[in-house]
Image (cartoon, rainbow, N blue to C red):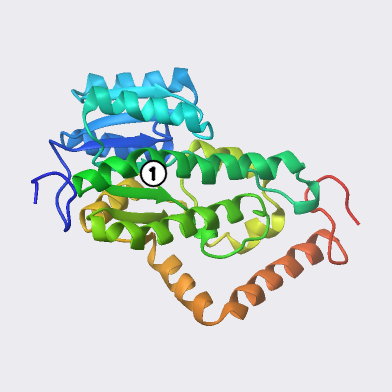
């Protein structure tokens, strides 16, 4: 096994590793890039916003990291192909691909514009698929590599208020679970991460848009710092884990709801009734916290 590559069994990431990270200009992607850079890995960042991407890259470079960056919309297949090829030419073959790029738009299903569903799917699912397709041939050819995608705890079960985001994260999980079995014989590790709420720019953006019912049943869920998630991702890659569900309570919930699916619906239904009694919303629909109410 190569010392710092990802071959057929576990190995430590460090000097000699080239990691390409989409969504690398902020949040979980940037936190993971910093952790890998601190270990001496070569890091390539991919993100749509050029200004914030440049700031992230300069910050890593100032700390002595070998860093490259490519500004591209991950939903653009041709653009992603060009960006990955350029980063490989500059930094060497891709040992690790981490796909963190994504967008979210919570809200009540009937009030979300149709284009939101398409945009969320294009960015989260196809924005995972295109980078994966770009690196898989070379990883198969080299007989090594690791691909990890960011799903979500709401990619494990459907969630009130996330009718655009939750299906997209289900799709990411389905892709990577399928790909895991296909690429394992080639020595390529494939996994996915299912964090709960994480203190990122996306989390801050969501807050004014979240339905009150969601806030009620999610109130006990801890909000993790991105550095915690980054540490779990790196350990998961080194141990070649196929699935990383963060937090003991979330792992218990996934196991419980998998065995007793009705338990989740009972819990959510109870929270919904509580909010609607409190706010005077009757019936099976009606918006809480603004807009049309009945």
Which corner quadrant holds the C terminus?
bottom right
The spot of residue 115 in percent (x, y) is 72, 39
Residue farthest right in this picture: 294
- Depth check, front residue: 248 or 29: 29
User: Could you say where residue 126 lies in the image, as x and y percent from the top left?
Assistant: 52, 42
Residue 9 vs 259, above or below: the answer is: above
Q: Residue at x 24, y 19 (%)?
A: 62
Q: Horizontally, is 75 left or right of 248 in the view?
A: right
Residue nearest the observer in this picture, 89 or 97:
89
Residue 221 in sight here: no
Q: Residues within 10 Å of mark 1 (few under 14, many from 20)?
A: many
In the picture, residue 207 is in which quadrant? Answer: top right
Residue denoted by label 1: 226
Res. 10 visible in picture: yes
Q: Position of residue 276 (x, y in %)?
A: 79, 63
Of the pair 126 and 198, the residue shown nearer to us: 126
- Residue sitting at x 48%, y 71%: 253
């Amino acid at each position: 096994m190569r010392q710092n590559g990802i071959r057929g069994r576990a190995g430590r990431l460090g000097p000699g590793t080239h990691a390409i990270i989409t969504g690398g200009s902020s949040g979980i992607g940037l936190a993971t890039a910093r952790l890998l850079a601190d270990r001496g890995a070569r890091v390539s960042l991919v993100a749509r916003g050029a200004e914030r991407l440049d700031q992230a890259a300069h910050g890593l470079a100032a700390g002595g990291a070998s860093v490259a960056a490519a500004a591209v919309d991950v939903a653009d297949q041709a653009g992603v192909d060009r960006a990955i090829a350029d980063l490989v030419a500059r930094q060497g073959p891709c040992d690790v691909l981490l796909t963190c790029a994504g967008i979210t738009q919570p809200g009540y299903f009937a009030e979300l514009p149709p284009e939101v569903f398409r945009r969320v799917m294009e960015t989260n699912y196809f924005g995972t698929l295109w980078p994966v397709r770009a690196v898989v041939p070379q990883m198969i050819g080299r007989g090594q590599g690791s691909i990890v995608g960011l799903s979500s705890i709401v990619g494990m079960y459907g969630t009130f208020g996330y009718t655009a985001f939750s299906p997209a994260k289900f799709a990411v999980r389905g892709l990577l679970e399928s790909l895991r079995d296909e690429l394992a014989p080639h020595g390529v590790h494939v996994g996915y991460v299912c964090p709960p709420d994480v203190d990122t720019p996306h989390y801050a953006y969501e807050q004014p848009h979240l339905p009150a019912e969601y806030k009620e049943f999610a109130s006990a869920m801890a909000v993790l710092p991105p550095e915690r998630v980054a540490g779990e991702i790196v350990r998961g890659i080194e141990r070649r884990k196929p699935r990383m569900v963060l937090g003991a309570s979330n792992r218990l919930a996934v196991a419980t709801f998998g065995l007793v699916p009705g338990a989740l619906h009972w819990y959510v239904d109870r929270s919904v009734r509580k909010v609607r009694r409190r706010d005077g919303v009757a019936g099976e629909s009606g918006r809480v916290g603004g807009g049309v109410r009945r």
